[in-house]
Image: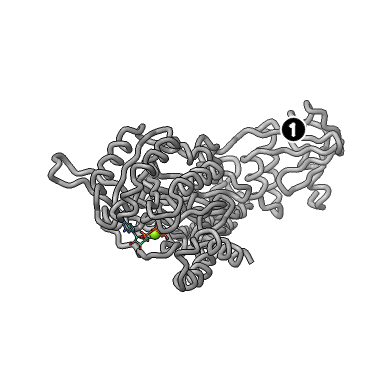
Amino acid sequence: MRYVSCTLHWLDVAQPPHQQSCRPLISAKILLVCLQEWKFFDTARINVKGGDGGDGCVAFRREKGIAMGGPSGGNGSRGGSVILRCDEGLNTLATVRNKVHYKGEDGSNGQGKCRHAAAPRDLFVRVPPGTVIRDQDGVLCGEVTDHGEELVVAKGGRGGRGNLAFKTDRNNAPKFMEVGEKGSMRWLTLELKLVADVGLIGVPNAGKSTLLAAVSNAKPKIADYPFTTVIPNLGVWEESAEVGGSPKGLVLADIPGLLEGAHMGVGLGLAFLRHVQRCRVLVHVVNGDSPDPLGDFEAIQQELELFNIKLAGKPQVVVLNKVDLPHVAEKQAEIEAGLLAMMPHKRLMTISAAKRLHTSELMYRVLKLVQSLPEEEELFNGEDIRTLEPDDDDEDRGFQILSDPAYPGQWRVAGTRIERTARMTNWDYYEAIVRFQRIMDAMGVNQELLSAGAKKGDLIMIDEYDFDFSGDLKASSLLQQYLQDSGLQ
Ligand SMILES: Nc1nc2c(ncn2[C@@H]2O[C@H](COP(=O)(O)OP(=O)(O)OP(=O)(O)O)[C@@H](O)[C@H]2O)c(=O)[nH]1
Ligand SMILES: [Mg+2]
């Protein structure tokens, strides 16, 4: 339904009665098809899951002539991670559009005879430059802009250690191992923003694609009906070598024409306004041949403001186009005066994109403007970035005791290290449980629980495991209870 209403609006608003012909009907069909396509090219929602780590192995060396050969269980390998990798050969999210689930390979289990498992390869997902990554709550998690740049979006789980790894002087025949950690899993939204210096904006038919073709190497489709451009075109303009020094270039993005209501999704606009957010300068092309060039200008300006006030405040050059047409040349002075009165910055030029009149001067002016801007624009407008997969070295060794007054007698011990240790403990092995208890004691968890007011019999929750608190500080307070409950002692 959305497509139908968009199209109707466009036919009503964008096509002045005197320009109507059979052409718009043809492009309406194209529009219907492309709108559907674009919804996916522009953003993609994917599920990423790191592979699970392999389990460690419990084994002892048994060889003829060697008594009590000692532990020989190897480590399980880590699971493969899912990594986004920026590829400059791509310019849409089409590659990720067709697939929703990306899962890293699981690690393998360790084996006897001290054989550690080999880690699987990571899964790389290619995305175009300018891909912005958000988590399922819309919180920004990062962006890739340079070719080869990588972002780990789902880490594979750690491999569990085999009993060989736990051999110490005090315990030279450990009979337990760790289980592999599960890989992390999350939903992500990918959003493509084109990385261009200059964004060409304006109403449909203003001549944006003609201007791009005039000044760059791009060969966009140009035609005398609105919405000729349905997918942004990128082109590179290069300063001519005669100027001396190394020639500078500008990347230009030509996007589909904007309509009134674009900020709400009318026409093709909304998806593309997102793209121009990253441009450093906007070139606003005004169609001199339009029945109301000043009205067009105002409408577009308003759409920018309604979409995002920062976008509207971007440095702009306004370009009055099609001055080669005699009836436009006649009104030129009048339109220019009208535009200048509405522009706070007064950067106005009059050109003919089709005849390449003043187009080169325009590009030098734009280049000067870009060069005058501070080096790097503030990324993401100060939005907080959430690190999806912190480095292992940053593992938080602290913990927190949490309780809710609504549930007296229940305590949650939260902390990266303690939770991971609980997940990787194999509760089937007595020695593994003893080890877990030792770690709890060494970290001071029991002491903290007592200080916080925990009593004998209270419920202690760590990750997905529940324990009863035995209420004393003896080395095995939680353990004794657990062992009794599970019939191990
Ligand atoms: N006479 C004249 N015609 C022009 C000029 N610039 C563009 N045109 C014509 O205007 C029509 C629209 O040009 P496009 O470049 O496709 O316009 P656009 O702004 O890219 O349009 P959309 O992609 O639909 O948003 C085409 O027929 C062009 O030949 C110009 O300077 N003079
Ligand atoms: Mg165009």
Question: Which sits in the foreground, 38 or 88?
Answer: 38
| Label 1 sits on residue | 446
Q: Determine crowd level at label 1: few under 14, some 14-19, many 20+ residues with C-alpha closer than 10 A.
A: many
Between 24 and 400, the one nearer to me in the picture: 24
x%, y% of residue 293? 43, 49
* Dot 1 amino acid type: Asn
Residue lying farthest to the top in this orientation: 451
- Can you give x and y, in whole percent of width and height, for residue 63 in the image? 51, 62
In the rendered view, would you say 182 is above or below 281?
Answer: below
Q: Position of residue 52 (x, y in %)?
A: 57, 58
- Where on the picture, by quarter, is residue 254? bottom left
Q: Quadrant of residue 246?
A: top left
In the picture shown, does residue 179 fall above or below 278? Answer: below
Q: Which quadrant of the render holds ligand 2?
A: bottom left
Q: Report the label total.
A: 1
Report the front residue among 124 and 477. 124
On screen, residue 6 versus residue 364, left or right, reads right
Q: Is mark 1 within 8 Å of ligand 1?
A: no
Q: Position of residue 467 (x, y in %)?
A: 79, 44
Left or right: where 22 falls relative to 484: left
Tell me if I can see residue 120 in this picture. Answer: yes
Residue 162: in sight, yes or no? no
